[in-house]
Image (tube, grey):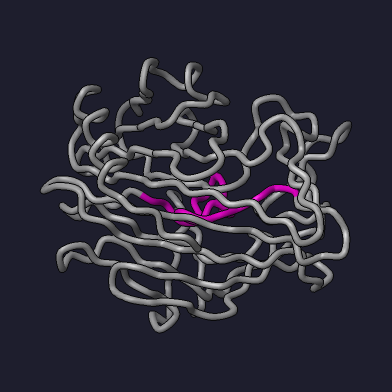
Amino acid sequence: MAVRCRRTRGPTVVDVAAPSDTASLSVGGRRVADYVWRPSLPGTVSPRPFLHPVRTLAGTEVTELMPGDHPHHLGVSVAVADVAGANFWGGRTFVSGRGSVPLANHGTQSHVGWAARTESALVQDLSWTGPDGVELLSERRAIAALPVDADAWALDVSFTLSNVASMPLSFASPAANGRPGAGYGGFFWRARRGNGRIRVLGPDRTGVRSLHGRHTPWMAISGNHGAPWTLIFIHSGPGTDPWFVRTGDYAGVGSSLAWDRPLVLAPGAAVRRRIITVAADGRPRSDQVAGLVAAVTAGTTEHRP
């Protein structure tokens, strides 16, 4: 697949030239997401597979790809800012005492093979290589599109990262490297901001300040892009990481592997995470969101990547 970018006064426009490198996911016969599993991207964005567009059942797009403010934001992806000095997030690298600087340290996630591929579920093997071409991590990633109700479906993403290097690997975020609050790195969803205010809520609190950097079993954001939409992010399986959430200059939610201190993987060790995201039409009330979380949590069975 080749991706051609052209600048406009708004977000970057991205042309996808070869759909053969795109796997579509469907729920009840509706195409709800495209997974670009072998992209051709500039090295500065840390090339990696991504989901875009992701749509609600009514067809509202709830992801953004390579926007002008952050060209390295690729819809829904797994991205880490610092793995043993390699940038698998894209863009600039935060260096203590220097700030965010451009470095030639970008890594790449490459498709190795399919363990499963259907219209509603994908299981993929990936290789994470540093800027020198040396493999640091192997990954098994599983993605599934699950029915929820007439107005919502769920995107189930789980991944296992295994250290295949001969040395311990340190995962770090800019926050762990000295930039307060910038704890991003792991699962990340760049949403379409659209018009109006983005609402943020959790199980017992609301607002970015109450959820950013906090451990909660779930959190949700609601916005409007032609029509109202809601995304509900649910921790599932082992590991409950702090949430990274932004709604000011852009709308984005992630689950941070290394919020304020590095995560170190010994050779041969692995880290596994699973996030289920409900994509719903409309703006459900807080009690309705909690009901959707309960239904999804009770109704999904774990698939292991």
Task: Please provide percent x and percent y for residue 38.
Answer: 53, 76
Q: Is residue 147 magenta?
A: no
Task: Report the label total.
Answer: 0
Quick check: is 80 in the magenta stretch?
yes
Front residue of 173/68: it is 173
Which of the 4 quarters of the picture holds residue 22? bottom left
Q: Is residue 132 left or right of residue 72?
A: right
Q: Nearer the viewer, residue 4 or 47?
A: 47
Image height of 54 relative to 286, above or below: below
Tell me where the magenta segment starts and ends, as one range. Answer: 63-82
Residue at the extreme left: 150
> Which residue occupies 63% across, 67% down?
109
Horizontal side of residue 181 vs 38, given as left or right:
right
Nearest the viewer among 303 and 74 is: 303
Q: Magenta stretch mostly in which secondary structure? A: loop
58 lies left or right of 266:
left
Residue shown at the point (19%, 28%) measured from the top left: 288
- In the rendered view, would you say 266 is above or below 131? above
Image x and y of residue 55, in percent? 27, 55
| Residue under the image location 71 percent in, 39 percent down | 173
Q: Is residue 34 left or right of residue 284?
A: right
x and y percent of residue 158 in the render?
48, 55
Identity of the residue drawn at 51% across and 78% down: 2
Q: Position of residue 26 (x, y in %)?
A: 24, 66
